[in-house]
Image: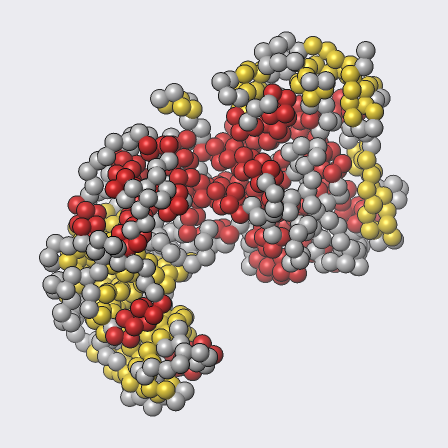
Amino acid sequence: MTRNGAVIQDAETYLRSLAEAQLRQAAGRRGSDAWRELQSVQLAAGALSDVGAIDTATADEIAVDLEVALAARGRIRNDSFERLITPQWRRYQVKPAPAGPFRTVSVETQVVTDIDGEPATITPFALVAAPDRTVLTVEVNRITTHNRVGWAMTSPGWYDVLSQVIITDSNGGKRGGKFWGGGSHDHVGGRVELNSPLPAGLEGLTWVELDFGAGAEPLRVDLSRAPVQPMVATRERHEATPAERYIDAATEELLITLVRNRKIGTSLAANTELDRVIEAFTATGVIEPGSLALSRLATVARRFKLRLPDELAGLADTELPEEWLSAIAAMPPNGRGEDSWDSRRFRQQLSGALPAAIVFPELGGARWTVAGMRRAGNWLRMNVLGWGVPVGARHLMHYGLDTLPEPFTWWARDDTGQWYFTSVDNGGLGEDGAEFDLELTPELSLDATSLDLILSGLSGRLTATIPLDGGPS
Amino acid sequence: MTEPWRAALPPASATVACAAGPHRLRWKEGVLSAPAHPDSEAELVLTALGGDETECLRLVRLWSQHADDLNVFTIGPRTPTDRLKLVRDERATVIQLTAPLAPRRLAKGHRVVVTAGIGPPSVAHVVARHNALRRSGFDPVGEHRVELLALLALGPAFQLRLTATVASAWADRKIPPSTEPRLAQALAGRLAPVAAGWLGIDPDQVQVSRHDGPGWGDLERTESGLRATLPLSWLASVWAAGLSVVDGRLAVGVTEVNGPRATVLAVRRPGDRPEPLTVVRRASKWTVTP
């Protein structure tokens, strides 16, 4: 098949040709490090699979066969054989979101305690009672400054205190939990997963009590208040094709990097792996060469003076979405800059917990909750937990979760009209679901008193309004 | 009559650490045999009854099982000099990988490891990971690949012969559409380097599809490369035998093999009509003979 004189290949043929070309390229180079060639195929395979152009098993097989072929030729380190046994992204079989009520409750209180002789605060953000498990989002912060070397990371106390929490409910039930998370020498954050779930939706309970031990008074969380329903849900059909959504999501990721760092004058390939994806999408016809999504990407790239790949060079500038323009316009001229470890730590210590307890209705088979929020001035971070979240091949090529799981996008807009990109930090994605911290770019306007959190999926869009003044959410 | 591809490939042998000591495996005219096990059928019966399977017979069995394994094309050699750095190491413990369903049948102390040639092997990690996954009910596919790697570890001569075996197995089949991309890849991956050397073109500019039906196929020069249609049998009878380019001509088929002499159909340029060419093999190299 041809389009505008170019041969359009089916996705499998394209991927197999690409794999052969990359194997030849690796063989023709000195040295044994052919990860670049392998990743090139993995990336194209993942992207084509994610947009439904090829079934995941076939894409997976092509990438793994190349990996075996490279390893068998000594072109990648032979520890890669470990991964040949089972393709990495076949190891996950995502569990569907459980049926039944979900409920999230803000805890809104802080416990001052002593851990290993050091004063510290424990901040339980919110309790999420899903039909299959109950999760408490929580963090511990050291109060005093201290020499960081060899303290928390070598001390089990920080993790133990979170795993030793006892949760008692108003029916007399007692449950322990296990902490999952990580942190630094003066901050540990994550979630405590209860050994057995509380009743789904906390039905039949009037309170739960959290006892962290370590001499701290137990915290009682009143459940008798009617569940707060902050949701304003609207459904709008999203007309873009999966490939266009993929490109738009990638462009948003690019924009976040660019507005933060102002990495102008480099090539698009230097900022993203998008050139390979674009080539794969156009060569296989899953996206029209003149697609608006590609035009938007080209427009963004030109605005930041990025060198464009051939597939985009001929595309004229187009209008960018209002939210992108709003977010770009709010950025300082020199970018915000990447967060240093110290600045993150500083903000973490200064931040206060704000109530945020949102349960989104089912969207695209997934259930999403926001379980707590931290704010320090114009810095804002939300704890997000998801059930039934599909694992795209793109995410499984990298350990951990560093971008938002597709096909979902998250945007925020405050009550002054300012739009914010969102990005992922401390993310994880697996068969049980997704868990990540959501951050805003640019930084939160200090004039804002509420924030609309807008979650979009293939089947629609949901909006939740979060007060920023500390009131109940 | 022996098929040309079987006759065009000379016999090959490899040493295998079998239960009773080092044994030879022998390939001749398309058949892999274990001469040290003349009563292999009786041994197979014993194995079926729970006895240990010897390494020789295990490899013969695997050869038969993988005789139409399309993964041979994706993992195996792309050119006769494309070296897979797979080694057989009797000290290692990967035997569980290659016969996990019947570990009690395996000969003790005779094990095969498949590893790449650089860096310290991490076979123990592979085994542990694989066994863990197997316990969890995961993955017959990885096991299948590891079996194949054990066969490819028999050496370059066996790699070419296994490729020819698989190509021959598929050459006469009715090919389902879903398999076409894999066969096209098999042809393209092996014709591209040949054509690049033959015409001085970029191998990435070689487009290949499988020829089905009478005749040998077609070669057409494109603006920057070559468009080729060749039958799958080309891999068995021409490519694996090292006959791809002889005297500056691309062989597109083999019509007859008689000892070290073969008659091939070859073209000097894309678009030419193929002409018979008699070649003779001397020290594994084919040269034109009057």
Q: Residue at x 66, y 29 (%)?
A: B167
In percent of width and height, residue B241 lies at: 74, 27
- Identify whether A113 is placed above or below B137: below
Number of callouts in the render?
0
* Residue B40 in sight here: no
User: Percent from the top left, x then y, of residue B220?
Assistant: 55, 15
Side of B124 relative to A114 (left or right): right
Q: Residue at coordinates 26% horizontally, 80% vertically from top-left?
A: A110
In-front residue for pair A330/A452: A330
Quarter the C terminus of chain A occupies? bottom left
Residue A414 lies, in percent from the top left, at 15, 58
Q: Residue at x 29, y 72 (%)?
A: A346
Indicate the colouring scheme.
secondary structure
**Residue sitting nearer the eye, B290 or A91:** B290
Q: Is residue A80 left or right of residue A237?
A: right
Q: Is B64 above or below relative to A446?
A: above
Q: Residue at x 56, y 35 (%)?
A: A20
Q: Is residue A197 above or below residue B206?
A: below
Answer yes or no: is residue A214 visible: yes
Q: Nearer the viewer, residue B243 or B70?
A: B243
Place residue A446 in its image quadrant: bottom left
Residue B187 vs residue A433, the one in the foreground = B187
Q: Is residue B126 left or right of residue A228?
A: right
Placement of the N terminus of chain A among the 4 image quadrants: top left
Q: Would residue A27 appear left or right of B264 to someone viewing this image?
A: left
Give the percent coordinates (x, y) of residue B58. Answer: 76, 47
Rendered position, B2 above or below A452: above
The quadrant holding residue A55 is top left
